[in-house]
Amino acid sequence: GCIVSANPYYPVGFADQYAAHGLGADRADTMVRTASVLRRGIPLSLHSDLPMGPAAPLALASFAVNRRTPAGRVVAPEQRISVHEALRAITIGAAHSWRLEHEIGSIAPGKAATFTVLAEDPYLVDPERLADIPILGTVYAGRWFPVDHAPRHAG
């Protein structure tokens, strides 16, 4: 079988420029066809291609769910995926792409106790706010690492 690992930032960050300079609107808008992948039953993982997109999993999920450019345009709305599908693609889908789904990617007995703790339920917030959910901390290998929200001072 195959796994698709996609960067959902491309249509959000580049569709407007690519539509105007090179690809045309139809091709630019349909970059990263995440919904088509899932409709065909192909496992999906989302990644950032850092530095081509932000290394922020909730932002990646938001890009895949909303597909809204900085100009406010929704590109290829038929390629948007649900919040559940996007969260799955940044967790168990990502683990599956590394063949580590038996160790990480979901919370289950026998798996590593490694996960992120959010301040809000991503299923209950407005999907447009998905990337803005505060992160409280991370549990890594069973150990709690809170996010330090204190301002940093140079010096």
Image (spheres, rainbow, N blue to C red):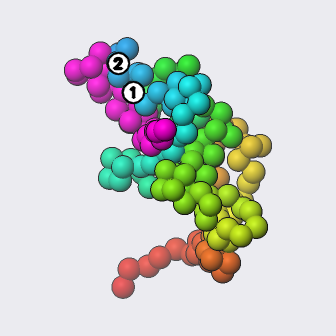
Gap between marks 2 and 1, in whole Å?
7 Å
The reply to whether discs 2 and 1 touch (Cβ–Cβ < 8 Å) is yes
Q: Position of residue 58 (x, y in %)?
A: 57, 50
Within-10-Å neighbours for mark 2: few <14, some 14–19, many 20+: some
Q: Which mark is residue 103?
A: none
Q: Secondary structure at mark 2?
A: helix
Q: Secondary structure at mark 1?
A: loop
Amino acid type at image mark 2: Arg
Q: Quadrant of residue 138?
A: bottom right
In the image, 82 versus 41, the foreground residue is: 41
Q: Quadrant of residue 6?
A: top left
Q: Position of residue 56 (x, y in %)?
A: 49, 54
Q: Which mark is residue 31?
A: 1
The C terminus, quarter of image: bottom left
Q: For the view shown, which residue lies furthest in the front direction?
A: 1
Amino acid type at image mark 1: Met
Q: Which residues are magenta?
A: 1-24
Q: Position of residue 127 (x, y in %)?
A: 66, 37
Q: Which residue does the numbered mark 2 point to in the structure image?
A: 27
Say which residue appears at 71% left-offset and 70% top-offset. 110
Count of marks overlaid on the render: 2
Q: Is residue 37 visible?
A: yes
Say which residue appears at 69% left-offset and 64% top-offset. 117
Residue 8, compared with residue 132, is above or below; it is above
